[in-house]
Amino acid sequence: MNIFKRHLTALAVSAALMPTAAVQAGEVEVLHWWTAGGEARAAAALKQMMEEQGHTWKDFAVAGGGGEAAMTVLKTRAVSGNPPAAAQIKGLDIREWAELGFLTSLDSVAESENWDQLIPPMISDVMKYEGEYVAVPVNVHRVNWLWVNPDVMEDAGVEIPTTLDEFFEVADKLKAEGYIPLAHGGQPWQDATVFDAVALAQLGPEDYRKAFVDHDMDVINSEKMEEVFSQFARVMSYVDDDAAGRDWNTATGMVIRGEAAMQIMGDWAKGEFTAAELTPGEDYLCAPAPGTAGQFTFNVDSFAMFSLTEDEDIKAQKDLARTILEPEFQTLFNQNKGSIPVRTDMDMGAFDTCAQASMETFRSSAEDGGLVPSFSHGLATTSYIQGQIFDVVTNFVNSNNPDPAKTTDQLAAAIQSAM
């Protein structure tokens, strides 16, 4: 039993005799951490849509972009017998909540709304437990993006790199011209995001899945993975010396101001460019991370649906699930968030050029096998195994003398111990 399950089991024992709270008829309580900016506006719009259907929305917002604080509160609520109707939960953590018996089936909604025809299997499988939907995806973030300042590139006389070798050549020229080649924040999840992109470029989608989804030791503890670490070290050598502790949006600001040329970051970075009133394709450019053209590393926000007892609340919960995947909300939410709709049948005419390019690759990669779940953002594996990988990557980045072969052995040992 992993740490997640042990913690919930302990809480359940202590809370077994606690009374449950009364719930108003037709109420849908939603736990999320969309508390600022465009995300907050999108949450408000979803609330309005639910109220227009005659339901009462109870906001259960817990600040904190990564959701750690929200999960702490959720565990206590769930084991005391008073869960919200829906909670923002990601990746394989959905399955763990389902295994513990907290979640309810959404198959009646999924069948009536044809979810299996609208959502790629790579994503719908994450939303299911034992073949039944227990969660609904809200959006798709592309993690393997390269954000570029075109004026800096023009001044240095270089083009957007499409391979890792090209990246190194371009970065050398940028450095010679006095620019920071790669804007970055020295935080574990940001280090892992760059490593994620390098691993996909070096391994390709098939071996990426074997390593980070299937935990295939033949790939994890191999010369291929040693080369991933070797290339990763070269990429990170083009980050400035002041990166430690820097927030991701501060790094994006470096690209916006022309201090740095490029940033490897998910499409939530687009919100910073939008806030600066910049136009994609003109004031800034988006391109696949070097070596990953045609491939798509996805991060998905989703709501898991908890078992309820009152008929009115159950109806409100199902209406919430249906509403989240309707085109109106998919458009509104994703335009604010910087992501793209999870539905592959959406008209992208109202979206910007980066979102349109993202959707094109999302659709094609879902067909040709280039669509992979991001381990750095919790879609490929459990949060516990993800944490073990983060530790290995962070130690490698902070090492004075990084050793790819030794680190590959450490990665294999860390994953094996966490399984």
Image: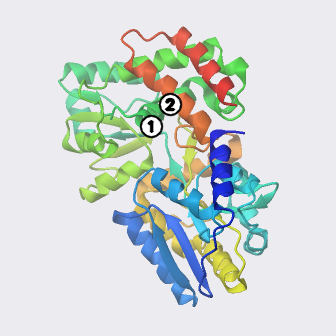
Q: Are marks 2 and 1 in contact (CB under 8 Å)?
A: yes
The disc at residue 5 is none
Residue 351 can be seen in this image: no
Q: Pointer 1: residues within 10 angstroms few (<14), some, or many (20+)?
A: some
- Name the image quarter holding residue 3: top right
Of the 4 image quadrants, the one containing the N terminus is top right
Relative to 227, residue 138 above or below: below
Whether residue 366 appears in this view of the structure is yes
The earlier-in-sequence mark between 2 and 1 is: 1
- Towards the viewer: 74 or 81: 81
Pointer 2 residue: 390
Residue at horizontal 26 percent and vertical 20 percent from the top: 173
Q: Amino acid at mark 2?
A: Phe
Is residue 104 rendered to the left or right of residue 269?
A: right
Position of 313 relative to 99 (above/below) = below
* SS at badge 2: helix
What residue occupies the far right of the structure in this picture? 130
Expressed as whole percent of the image width and height from the top left, the position of residue 162 reads 45, 30
Residue 155, relative to residue 219: is it above or below? below
Residue 42: image x %, image y %?
A: 44, 70
* CA distance for labels 2 and 1: 7 Å
Under circle 1, the secondary element is helix
Residue 329 percent across, percent down from the top left: 52, 73
The image quarter containing residue 323 is: bottom right
Q: Which residue does the numbered mark 1 point to in the structure image?
A: 189
Of 145 and 396, the residue lying toward us: 396
- Give above or below for 6 relative to 243: below
